[in-house]
Amino acid sequence: MSKRTTTLLLFVALIIVVGAAYFLGSARSGPADERFAGADSKASELIDQTNPDYQPWAQNVFTPSSSELESGLFAIQAAIGAGVVGYAVGVLRSRRKIEQARDEGRAAALRDAEEPEAADG
């Protein structure tokens, strides 16, 4: 399969996944505020329902003053994580290309060594 075909299939798959998520997400019922509720709030609700006398054993180190600040900090964290992953992928890809070039150079040197030298005439 060619790279172009693979890229096209991946792009189509991405469109299908995003489209399905969009339509499934918009079909959800419930208040708009709860649509984007995270796992922390869901877990807190479940704990309150199953064990109302529960007392947390740890406190937050830092609590953002607004939801905008919380979203901004999350975006910064995601950007740093994406940067680290991108750097690691780039390093691994460069390393592979260098190894391939080195191997090709060794193969060329072996071919050159095996060929009989033409006698100057």
Image (tube, rainbow, N blue to C red):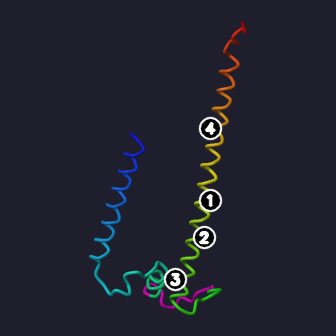
Is residue 50 shown in magenta?
Answer: yes
Mark 4 vs 2, N-terminal side: 2
Element assignment for label 2: helix
Front in this rendered view, residue 44 or 121: 121
The relative height of residue 11 versus residue 2 in the rendered view (above or below) is below
Numbered tag placed on residue 71 in the rendering: 3
User: Horizontally, is 109 left or right of 71 in the view?
Assistant: right
Q: CA distance from mark 4 to mark 2?
A: 30 Å
The stretch in magenta equals: 49-59
| Disc 2 target residue | 80
The amino acid type found where label 2 is placed reads: Ile
| Camera-side mark, 3 or 4 | 4
Residue 3 versus residue 37 in the image, above or below:
above
Which residue position holds label 4? 100
Q: Residues within 10 Å of mark 4 (few under 14, many from 20)?
A: few
> Label 4 vs label 1: CA separation?
20 Å
Q: Quadrant of residue 74?
A: bottom right
The residue drawn where x is 29% and y is 76% is 26
Indicate which disc, 3 or 1, sits on the residue closer to the N terminus. Answer: 3
Q: Are marks 3 and 1 in contact (CB under 8 Å)?
A: no
> What is the spatial separation of the Cα atoms under label 1 and label 2, in whole angstroms?
10 Å
Seen at 57% across and 81% down, the residue is 73
Q: Observer-nearest residue: 12 or 55?
A: 12
Quadrant the N terminus occupies: top left
Q: Is residue 39 left or right of residue 112?
A: left
| 100 is within the stretch colored magenta | no
Q: Which amino acid is tagged 3? A: Ser
Residue 117 lies in quadrant: top right
Label 2 Cα crowd, 10 Å radius (few <14 / some 14-19 / many 20+): few
Identify the secondary structure beneath mark 1. helix
